[in-house]
Amino acid sequence: MSGEFDFIQTYLSDRQMNRKDVHLSLGDDCAIVKAPENVRIALSTDTLVAGTHFLANANPAWIAHKALASNLSDLAAMGATPAWVSLALTLPTIDEPWVKSFCDAFFELANYYHIQLIGGDTTKGPLSITLTVQGFVPEDNALTRDGAQIGDWIYVTGQLGDSRAGLEVILDENQRHKPFASELEKRHYLASPRILVGQALLDLASAAIDISDGLIADLGHILHRSEVGASLNVEDLPCSKELLDFCYSSRVAQQYALSSGEEYELCFTVPEENRGSIESALAHTGTLVTCIGQVRTQGIFEVLHHGKPVDWQLSGYDHFKA
């Protein structure tokens, strides 16, 4: 393969049907797109770096899924409908089997969510992936972090803690003898962005965020922006059977659920008057949703086990402290 343009033509061009709102995409200096009336555009950019977000020898299909799913999760947290994505891919060399596997998985997930690749860049260097996703939200109706009110109920989607267990398996071969180690490793990479849940919550939730740095840290962002506090009930945290078996302890599994990063589930708050509508509104998504606590006055942040405080000294993930 002789260069960048051959790479684009071979692996990135003609992989998708053109969306009607895409007027010009790959092959020019800029993409040209058109947004529908009465919507706003939600944008998010994330970078994944080999050695920080994934091991360079990891399954390239899993890396592609993780890269796109993590960005789609940001759109889900805003209640946005995915539309377009740009990809900047830095490669040390063009390893054709690696690139083919990566691109096949990338487009499989992109096509599932009807999000079109409209541009980007390729260059030589240490392996890294940068994506910018764009989606639509109804005008003046996006989910944000600053709307939680005292008395609102705190919910999460899915099951929490699996990603941290999977990361331990990836980083420590000695963990591979534990129950469900391979399954948890797979779950670390293959999260399901909660797009349908976010859309269904637009008229029900008061605030939302996706769990990328750990429940403790990400809920903390909602509390800070909304100027409120919270109490959480650890016995209500949704932990998978696989995580419980892997940890050999419900207490350890609950600690994982509170601190595990890269879950890409949603944490959201719901006013009392909307609480009865949650189950029916989300029924079509097929997603587990669990109430784990309640919003309190500012300055209160308590983690309770059957009503009694626990002091586990947990925190989320910080890229510059890791």
Image (tube, rainbow, N blue to C red):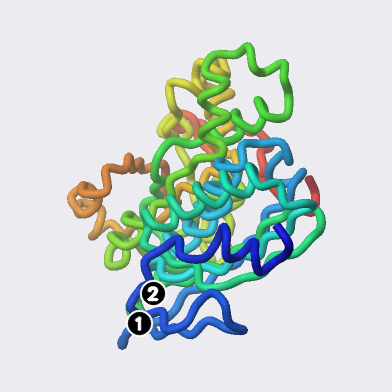
Mark closest to the chain's N terminus, 1 or 2? 1
Out of 175 and 65, give the one closest to the viewer. Answer: 65
Q: Quadrant of residue 238?
A: top left
Q: Which mark is residue 136?
A: 2
Q: Looking at the image, is 231 positioned above or below residue 185?
A: below
Taking the spot 53% from the left edge, 43% from the top edge, the residue there is 263
* Type of the residue with mark 1: Val
* 247 displayed left or right of 17: right
Find out whether the residues at labels 1 and 2 contact each other: C-beta distance under 8 Å.
Answer: yes
Q: Residue furthest front?
A: 2
Query: Where 164 sits versus 67, above or below?
Result: above
Res 39 label: 1
How far from the left and from the top, in percent, is residue 186? 53, 31
Which quadrant is the N terminus positioned in? bottom right
Give amino acid for label 2. Phe
* Residue 304 falls left or right of residue 318: left
